[in-house]
Image (cartoon, helix red, strand yellow):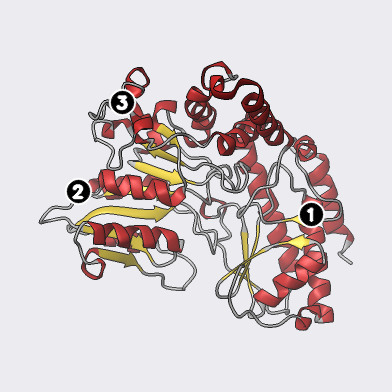
Amino acid sequence: MFPTPLMEKAAALDRADPLARFRGEFYVQPGEIYLDGNSLGLMGRPAEAAAVRALAEWRALGINGWTDASPPWVDLPESIAAQLAPLVGAAADEICLTSSTTGNLHQLLATLFVPTAQRSVILGDQLNFSSDAHAITSHLRLRGLDPAQHYREVTSRDGRTLREEDIVAAFTDDVALAVLPAVLFTSGQLLDVAHLTREARARGVMLGWDCSHSIGAVPHAFDADGVDAAFWCSYKYLNGGPGAVGGLYLNRRHFDRAPGLAGWWGVKLSRRFAMSHTHEPAAGAAAFHVGTPHLLSLAPLQGALEIFSAAGGIAPLRAKSLALTRFLMEAIDAELSGLGFTISNPRADAQRGGHVALAHAEAWRICQALKVEKVVPDFRQPDVIRLAPTALYSSFNDCLEAVVRLKHIMTTRAYEQFAARTGGVT
């Protein structure tokens, strides 16, 4: 059992939490502590209602839903872009809600990567999500360029984090484009987007940010920071549901670029149904649509974003997220000392995203035992237990109780009943 001071602190923090009222807007299972919002956010009631409404409109309106639904389906991506824009510090017309994370990276590569004799390298990093590397290397091959010569990665000195000075040093004269994660998906390290964007631009390098593990948890200021481009998924902290439509941002200074991957939905609305074989792009980032929007995957995101607005935007969510992870680390330090755990995420608020990365040699088996104890974590290779309390539906007592159950697992060695990981779904 935890010492009284920690119990009292959790209770006091929960009583003072201005976002506690939103917990009831989500389907939190009784007795379960859900700490996997950085992989898939929980279903919110407004998201469910929006999905049900879209189905009802389809049933009642059929094809007329494109014009007569509320909002009309034809405008839904732009309507949701306006909801999302304040979370990333951008204008609505700089956002295109379409495709998936990797699909949008392919679109940005096809549009922004213009190799020259002097600059033909794409820069990534050793710790980024694998799909980004797959997209970059496959794109280079499509351009007739050998990834062994034209793809370079910033290496990690400790296997968990990146040094920003190493990133800046990698912005060399032969680099045309860099793709970096705003938050590293394993360690939760938050990179300084503004600083690195300035450094890249000063060296003639275009920089795109993968914001999949930051959007909805960390405030962004894309316009103010001069970001060239960004892309993300919508099913983690945004709670848009599994397979939710992704998004991309393109700074307006690049609006004159024709989309590298063009399709009919990227044509301006007044000409979309003219079926001309001449691509007449829509204004702004909307030109980067390819095919017909996935309405049934967009609708839940529309509802999910209503809660962000009701909560007062991203600033209070970030404040609570930092407080939750700070308290979680405090509980880990107090109660799990000597049990083989290491907190591998940065501890400083300015360098930490939305989750705590807890390293242990038996991380895989411990994650299986946590699930039996009704704590939902996330495992990442080789030895990381990701614990992501989410501002809209997690409590400080959740963090405390998760560590209580984790300590019980370790002291009873309950994790030993599970086989070592041999691959497959994590």
Dot 1 surroundings within 10 Å: few (below 14), some, or many (20 or more)?
many
For the residues labelled 3 and 2, the Cα–Cα distance comes to 29 Å
Looking at the figure, which quarter contains the C terminus?
bottom right
Q: Is residue 70 above or below residue 248?
A: above
Looking at the figure, which quarter contains the N terminus?
bottom right
Q: Which mark is residue 277?
A: none
Q: Is residue 402 visible?
A: yes
Left or right of 162 on screen, residue 141: left
> What amino acid type is highlighted by mark number 3?
Met
Q: Is residue 417 above or below residue 321?
A: below
Disc nearest the viewer among 3 and 2: 3
For the residues labelled 2 and 1, the Cα–Cα distance comes to 49 Å
Helix, strand or loop at label 1? It is helix
Q: Is residue 65 above or below residue 14?
A: above
* N-term-proximal mark, 3 vs 2: 2
Q: Position of residue 34 (x, y in %)?
A: 74, 54
Residue contact at pointers 2 and 1, CB within 8 angstroms? no
Query: Label 2, on which residue?
Result: 114
> What amino acid type is highlighted by mark number 1?
Asp
Q: Which mark is residue 275?
A: 3
* N-term-proximal mark, 3 vs 1: 3
Dot 2 surroundings within 10 Å: few (below 14), some, or many (20 or more)?
few
Residue contact at pointers 3 and 1, CB within 8 angstroms? no
Left or right of 35 on screen, residue 264: left
* N-term-proximal mark, 2 vs 1: 2
The residue that appears at 52% across and 41% down in the rendered structure is 245
Dot 3 surroundings within 10 Å: few (below 14), some, or many (20 or more)?
few
Helix, strand or loop at label 2? It is loop
Q: Position of residue 359 (x, y in %)?
A: 62, 72
